[in-house]
Image (cartoon, rainbow, N blue to C red):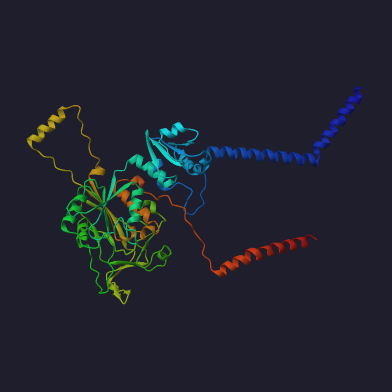
Amino acid sequence: MQDNSAEQNMRWHARLVRKLQSRQFRSGGYAASYVLVFAAILVAVNWLAVQYNETYDSTGQKLYSLSDQTHRILDNLDRDVTVMYFDRTSQFEGAQDLLRRYENASGRVAVEYVDPDEDPVKTEAMNVRSYGTVMLMIGGVRHEATSLTEQDITNAIIMALKGQDRVACVVTGHGEMAGDDRERNGLAAAVERMEGANYEHRDVNLVSGAVPEDCTLLLVAGPATAYFEPEVAAIRSFVEGGGRLLLLLGAVLPDAMGRRDDTNPELVELVAGWGIDFRNDVVIDESAIGQLFGGGPFAPLVSEYGFHAIVEPMENIATLFPRARSVTAADDPPETWEVDELFESSDASFSTSSLQAEEGAFTLGPESAQTDGPIPLAVAATYDVPDPEPEASGQDAEGADAVEDEGDVEEVPADPEEQRQGRVVAVGSAGFASNYGLGLGGNEDLLLNMLNWLSSDEDLISVRPKDPESTPIEMTAAEMSRIWYGSLMLLPLVIIITGVWTWWGRR
């Protein structure tokens, strides 16, 4: 009996060995190993995806990534931000793609999705009246974004952090570009961008000889006639008292009589005393590159920039300046002024002071009146306002002693950067900020960067979110015909021939 049992065990063992050594078992084992390894890889990939929620944006303009401006704002947050999106539950998925980018970019940002039908209490408490509303809670204060877009959400964060106390005063009265003009040479588009960036726009006239006290900065955009002495004095007093000025003076092209006198000699003389030299010339760019961006010979292209906060984020972004004149830093500026050139035109450009108009066309004068490029087109300048001298009267001394004796009174010193420094940005083109020019290259970003630097908001200087663009393909009838025949006839024919050739070779 025991012999039979031992024999059966030996037979079973032999069958097991043969089974383990069989090709079928080895193939099955390999397959099981592959499945386990593949499953382990999937688990690891999913775990990494949860731990490191990263995406890659392959679009040319990074349309599905947060902009540099938004990242700067989120990196510098000093308080928590709660973004609340109110909509039907079925619509949450459409908002998550954008709002997750904010959560991933900063640990201080949290997102809540609220269905007004399921949570009417919170909806009523936040005073939400419509689906698709975006509310921000910052420091216990509620702020509403105008729409579910990066630009509007980021602007709402900026407004909540800084408040809307920045007033851009646009000077009028001498044929300047108007903020309500929507024609080609108007300023309406620039005003809309400024208001979108939380600047309050106001038109001012300086005939009274004074700049309104609540003006954060002055914008002088392409005046057509000369300023009066009280107006020039008002600008001088404003800047030298710590105010901010954006001065856009473009080139004057010759008329039919060949005249091209500078229409703003008073303003040119004013800034010359600050170390800024506007030259009465015209910058011409003969390269074909500018034409690809919508410019021409009288709209020089800039692709390289200097070392300054205004242009730091503009690397690899082209800008164009219609009807430009050269603007340079003086060789010997006043000691109280620091002047930096921001950018220059290309090597293929030149400036001339002898442009002539003949029979509807422009002709160049002698080469001796030309200056080879690159040509400086803009400068930024700062002025250190002297500290006021204290009065030494006895009455003031007694008043100071009295204040000192009061232990509960503390004088808060003014911010020196905000109160005691004048700033000027001078650009040799007014057209770059016009309705036409603002859409060329990165002109919009450059204009807003200038405004933010003037208002001492350097943390807002950046390249802003871009709206998705339509990029249609334009083709001729011949090109369409080639594509049709290639896709419907040539490609299938190649596949058939390849298949027949393979089949014949295997036979």
Query: Can residue 187 be seen?
Result: yes
Which residue is located at x 21 percent, y 46 percent?
213
Dividing the picture into quadrants, the one containing residue 343 is bottom left
Which residue is located at x 60 percent, y 65 percent?
483
Query: Depth check: 284 or 169 in front?
Result: 169
Q: Residue furthest left?
A: 394
User: How many labels were placed on the picture?
Assistant: 0
Query: Depth check: 301 or 467 in front?
Result: 467
Which residue is located at x 69 percent, y 65 percent?
493
Point out the image quarter for the C terminus: bottom right
Q: Is residue 147 above or below residue 379?
A: above
Dividing the picture into quadrants, the one containing residue 491 is bottom right
Q: Residue furthest top?
A: 1
| Side of 379 where 122 appears, left or right | right
Q: Residue furthest bottom?
A: 359
Q: Position of residue 134 (x, y in %)?
A: 43, 40
